[in-house]
Each structure stands twice: as C-alpha cells, then as structure tokens.
Amino acid sequence: MDYIALAIAIAGAVFYYKAAEHENKSPVAWTGLSLLVSALLIFVVHAGYFLLVAGQFALLIAIALWRTWRENDAGEPKS
C-alpha cells in the first residue's frame, strides 16, 4: 500500500469536507466525490502523486463550474 497516495486522498477529502461546510453544501457529497476521484486514480489508472493532486484540482474546477452554471441558470427568468 502506498501511504503517500493514501495521505493525499485523505487530505483531499478533508479539504472538500471543510470547503462544503464553508459553502453550506453537503459535505458528504463533496467528500464522496473526492474519494471517488482518488480511488479511480489510485486503483484503476495507477496514477502517481502528481496526477492525484491534479485530479483533486480538476474536481475543484468541475465543482466551481457546476455551481456557476447552476447559479446562473437559477437566476434567469423562464419563458
């Protein structure tokens, strides 16, 4: 077992848990997504440390884009 990869996965999960609490969103969903990304990268792709961190960063970008899209979509009047 690669303990550094496990530490990166746990650090990412803790980051997303705290970020979700700060944003008043579901910490379980954000933490679950983080752990899913880490598990896929570790066990399926056999990624290194850089790709683990890049995967967590990509998840951050994806969540930000999703929230931006949803907030803009909710603010527009329906015709």
Image (cartoon, rainbow, N blue to C red):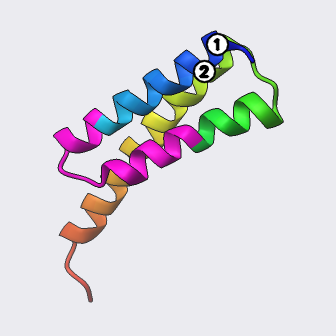
The residue under the point 32% across, 48% down is 27
71 vs 10, nearest the viewer: 10
Label 1 with label 2: CB-CB less than 8 Å: yes
Q: Is residue 58 magenta?
A: no
Question: What kind of element bears circle 2?
Answer: helix
> Which region of the structure is painted magenta?
18-35
6 vs 50, nearest the viewer: 6
The residue lying furthest to the bottom in this view is 79
| Disc sitting over residue 40 in the figure | none
| Disc sitting over residue 6 in the figure | 2
Q: Is residue 24 magenta?
A: yes
Q: Quadrant of the N terminus?
A: top right
Q: Is residue 61 above or below residue 75?
A: above
Amino acid type of the residue tagged 1 in the rendering? Tyr
Crowd tier of the residue under label 2, counting other residues whose Cα lies within 10 Å: few below 14, some 14–19, many 20 or above: some
Give the alpha-carbon distance from disc 1 to disc 2, as whole Å. 5 Å
Instruction: Name the spot of residue 74 as percent of width and height, x first.
Output: 24, 70
Residue to which mark 1 is pinned: 3
Q: Report how many numbered discs are placed on residues in the image.
A: 2
The kind of secondary structure the magenta stretch mainly shows is helix
Q: Is residue 79 above or below residue 11?
A: below
Q: Give the quarter of the image for residue 61.
A: top left
The residue under the point 26% across, 60% down is 72
